[in-house]
Image (cartoon, rainbow, N blue to C red):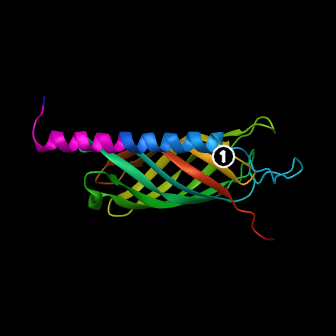
Amino acid sequence: MQTGPANFSNRIAARKIAIFCAIALAITLALAAAPESSAQSANDPSLENYPQFVPFGGAGASLSHGHSRCAMQLGASFAVAPTNSWQDLLLEGGYIGPWANLKTGSALFSANYLTRRKINSNEKFIPFFTAGYSRLFDTGNAINFGGGVDCQLNRTNALRIEARDYYAFTEPRRQDVALRIGYVIYLDLPD
């Protein structure tokens, strides 16, 4: 068993991830249990097929050169992804890096294909899959893929839970995986 500063910092990083996950779970449960606005009528259509803005955050691991570190993914995305369509696009910007040393992480930009499938029109859960190209600044080029589910909270918002994997295929090779939570805001843009 390791002792000393390295083991101590790993325990602190693990505690940070546990605290983040507990907070995220509490927010998720609170939002899912919140009653829908009484001002919304039954004839008011959902905005789920409108463009969406999603701030997100998550915890996971960064794997490189034979070792792993606790890591985070933070950022926001903009998507045009109507349900059950094949003409979908997601643009994402953010940060990926280890908890213990934030300055060793990378800013990122991603351009992705995103598909969202809704089986029943009255379903609150919309599963999705995404894959695409990412530029990890200070690291190199990467591919990314992931999937998850959007849980409709009301006609204008949803909670997104997803798993995402970024794999840098240029040197230095690295892989960043995380479980992320986002808050989907459907944008009712004027024509």
Q: Is residue 105 left or right of residue 153?
A: left
Image quadrant containing the N terminus: top left
Q: Is residue 46 left or right of residue 131?
A: right
Quadrant assignment, res 122: top right
Q: How many marks?
A: 1
Q: Nearer the viewer, residue 82 or 39?
A: 39
Image quadrant containing the C terminus: bottom right
Q: Nearer the viewer, residue 67 or 167?
A: 67
Q: Position of residue 73 (x, y in %)?
A: 42, 52
| Kind of residue indicated by mark 1 | Thr
Give me the residue at 53% from left, 52% from top. Answer: 132
Q: Nearer the viewer, residue 29 or 58?
A: 29
Q: Is residue 136 above or below residue 8?
A: below
Crowdedness near tag 1: few (<14), some (14–19) or many (≥20) residues, C-alpha within 10 Å: many
Image: magenta residue range:
2-17
Give me the residue at 20% from left, 45% from top. Answer: 9
Q: Position of residue 6 (x, y in %)?
A: 15, 43
Q: Is residue 4 above or below residue 140?
A: above
Q: Position of residue 10 (x, y in %)?
A: 23, 41
What main secondary structure does the magenta stretch of the protein show? helix
Q: Which residue is mark 1?
A: 115
Give me the residue at 44% from left, 39% from top. Answer: 22
Q: In this orientation, does residue 109 appear?
A: no
Q: Secondary structure at mark 1?
A: strand
Residue 13 is inside the magenta segment: yes
Give me the residue at 86% from left, 53% from top. Answer: 44
Q: In this orientation, does residue 25 appear?
A: yes
